Image (tube, helix red, strand yellow):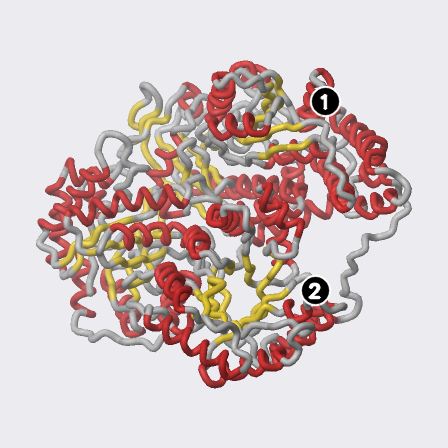
Amino acid sequence: MFFDGAMGTMLQQHGLTPGALPELYNLTHPDIVIDIHRAYVQAGADIVTTNTFQAHELKLSGEHSVEAVVRAGVRCARESGARFVALDVGPLGQLLEPMGTVSFERAYEIFRRQMAAGEKAGADLIVIETISDLYEAKAAILAAKENTNLPVICSMTFQEDGRTFVGCDPLTAVVTLQDLGVDALGVNCSLGPESLKPVIDMMLKYSRLPVILQANAGLPVIQNGQTVYDLGPETYAEQVMEMVRQGVRLVGGCCGTTPEYIRLLKEKIGNMSPVYTNPIRVTACTSGTQTVILDDRITEIGERLNPTGKKAMQRALRTGDIDFLLDEAIAQVQAGAQVLDVNVGLPDIDEPATISKAVREIQSVTRAPLQIDSSDPAAIEAGIRIYNGKPIINSVNGKKEVMDSIFPLAKKYGALVVGLTLDESGIPTTAQGRCEIARRIRDTAISYGIPEENLLIDCLVLTASAQQAQVKETLAAIRMVGSELGMKTVLGISNVSFGLPDRELLNSTFLASALGAGLDAAIINPYSKRCCEVLDASRVLNDEDRNAVNYIARHTGETVITAAPAKTDLSLAEIIERGLKDQSAGAVERLLENTTPLDIIDREFIPALDRVGKRFESAKIFLPQLMLSAQAVQNGFAVISSRMRESGQQRMTKGKILLATVHGDIHDIGKNIVKMLLENYGYEVVDLGKDVPPEAVVDAIRENDIRLAGLSALMTTTVKSMKDTIAAARKSGLGCTFFVGGAVLTQEYASYVGADYYAGDAMESVAIANRFFAANA
Amino acid sequence: MENAKAEVLRYLGYCGQALSPELDVMIEECMQSMREAVTPFQTRMTFCICSRTDGIRLDNTGIVLGGKDICRHLAGCGQVVLLAATLGAAADSLIRHWERLDITRSLVLDACATQYIEQCCDELEEQVKQEESECGLAITSRFSPGYGDLPLDTQPKLLAVLDAGRRIGLTCTERFILIPRKSVTAVIGLGENPHKRPDDCDSCPLKHTCSFTKGKRNYGYTEIDTEQNHVL
């Protein structure tokens, strides 16, 4: 099939000035738009794409409605006499969270409006194109699938390094997109056809769907200050022809191409028959920028984000302490986990809301794909919907009711699914019985349109202390599921040792046995040294760690990392003043042997910090040095806090302070430094994060009974939000005192926004807090 | 690299203090890891100035560069180069990643990224200078939205003219914050005898508030730049 070429290039030839909105031509110059479409149809295009690339509410402010511009766009395309009219949908032009400020839900809404208007106006299909962020692609695809009945094509834009601007690679794109229910996928813009060959090759290698290529007319080069493209129509068509020989099925053009390019494409390629590829089918999950393939290798799934039996995590979930989850996520990945299981199930929390928040935050700090773990279908859907990439669902089982509720979700969101080998009658005691359930799970999944490779079977571990004879059955089931059904297997290892001493020994031994039985993915505690050693060794024996490179690096000589902090003769005060942040925890441990926590805070932390603060104020040290000292205290504080929790003592606080970076502003490193210092001085900080709307600040002040709040803004444009926030709090009758800070802030600005205090730097915030709570004790 | 390191230190508020070896190593590591992590992208276009009443109007675009300061900056120029450059999303990810693990490292990385994007712009500026000198034209220094009284709402217009979203993945929020964060848009004037800005602290509009002069060192003239100015 032949698409058309560039619209923007053609409009500029017809007088569109750079920077003007091309989409408005649908209303102001429909004749020009129709003529361009018609020229493409005459050149041989089967499908023309409407001039609606950014006809959405972020770009069209005010004057013309999205509906009017889209309707006019579809009408222009129709009038050209084209066989098919594709509604063109480009990126939003603003980045989604966490990089930018547009939420996933808002993106979905914007796309929904544009697409619903397109279908209503009579478009035959939707082309989502020039996308860099897989998350944005997902929002657009869901908007199309849930609100229209049109076929959907999604094509992304890759740079010379083989990645999109936000770091997505073609493998991750194809693995994720093809299971999200699109009808074709591919590549457009950025480079000429030949330069896109590596990207196209990767897509053709894995794509079960037709692949589309709409390249630029070569590379943009600057001539006399203007952008021109370096490939002529003849060369362009020859290069595209080569791609069609490799299996590309839909072709057209992007920036710099004209009807002449399409005419030559049609001339050279029009008589070729489509080349069908034989795509590789793999079991893989993805994040927004990374793919983990589970075939022919051992995959490690981190189990720590699960509240079962973990008091600290239960507390974090109940108090909404998302930082705890993020630290755990990062630490597991650093320890070697390739995928993270995320379970937030507690009887007394709103699980769908919590998992949605957790997934959103965790995926902003790690590239590892996530496994959404819940027994509640609503929580599973909340988690996989907000997820950026192709997740794993943990889990479904052989019960009909469970399969009927989970498989439609897995199909719709294109997820991998873990199937547990149990059903209405419980867990079969024989390997044969479990294999039978696995078969049933597979057959049911296939009937829901889920490809077989998107399933993982969990043969279930029973504890050796209670059902010792069953452990061998699990291993036998793994072998049988692998050999008889050819399915991948996954297993939560740690259960086996429940109730027995030295659990690591049992866990690691069982892990080795399971891997020997052919286990593909192990859900383990990534901090377990023995289990990690077993994995390292197995990857050598499995011919996965080629030439044992990784093994040698990790197990040669004195690379063993000891957890104990280095012994030192320095006093805690010296450690803090020198900013030796890795030594403070050990020093605090030693002091705690004969000093109370309160004494450490009052006699060690605060005097040392005061001295450091004075040196900072007199410019004897500069910011990073102040921060290293603050981190040293922070690490010491962590020891004290956990000690107090263990002994059931309440955390003491000198006062509660709210901090927020105001609405529209996304710089929060300054605010985070202030937070750290305030906590060092014993204050409890309620941190609302960045880009916080005034209402959220007002609500939090009321809920937490806040008397002192700090607001941060970095830009002159967001200082206004500061004023709005303080005004909103005053209007609500809240007697809260405000201090403000941030790069552009001055005493004058502080007065202008109505703040009570201006903090020129982080230490001044501490001084303000000290004065405030001393006066208002 | 020594110059680059001095700049990184400047962004961190350094004014001659004794550096601990640990911090010194951290800065070197951060400079290297930032350079390894990112791929800078840039794009530019040249336009003729068609009118100077009510700001600078550029030929063949709807764009107006408003304010007195840009007019002064472009005195003696017949053309301008609009440019945009970015370190891309990888710089933001790296900084965000370390924010949780080690906030000091994250701050240092932030400064390294600021230094690096400025260096990229310096190189780009040098390239423009070379090209234009062949045509007998000299260039002004870079001038960005937010400098002086050139409004920040010029930002999305510059991006649109340069088609920067498509070409280099650069966008801006509704409050005109460039994303990816470590990005620059700027105007460079071209003329036979363009305006030269003064290069000393005394004529700098920031002279009363500049934190860089804390250590009494001369950092020359700094345009008020709400985007890149300080990290805190």
Amino acid type at mark 2: Ser
User: For this view, does A248 lie left or right of residue A509?
Assistant: left
Q: Which class describes the residues within 10 Å of circle 1: few (<14), some (14-19), or many (20+)?
A: some
Q: Looking at the image, which residue is at 28% across and 46% down?
A: A112
Return the residue at label 2.
A528
SS class, disc 1: helix
Taking the spot 57% from the left edge, 83% from the top edge, the residue there is A476
Secondary structure state at the residue bearing disc 2: loop
In which chain is the residue bearing label 2?
A
- Disc 1 residue type (three-letter): Asn
Work out which quarter of the rendered image holds the N terminus of chain A and state it.
bottom left
Is residue B67 placed above or below A498 in the rendered structure?
above
Instruction: Measuring from the top left, give residue A474's x and y in whole percent.
Output: 58, 78
Please rate how many residues cluster around mark 2, counting C-alpha atoms within 10 Å: few if below 14, some from 14 to 19, many from 20: some
Q: Residue A584 in the image: x percent, y percent?
A: 80, 44
Question: Residue A335 sits in which quadrant?
Answer: bottom right
Camera-side residue of B11 and A642: A642
Tag shown at residue A770: 1
Q: Nearer the viewer, residue A419 or A490?
A: A419
Asked whether, in this view, residue A15 is left or right of residue A483, the answer is left
- Residue B183's label in the rendered image is none
Contact between marks 1 and 2 (CB within 8 A): the answer is no
Kindly identify the residue that appears in the image at 30 percent across and 24 percent down. Answer: B51
Q: Give how far across and how far down residue A660 sits, in percent.
A: 56, 31
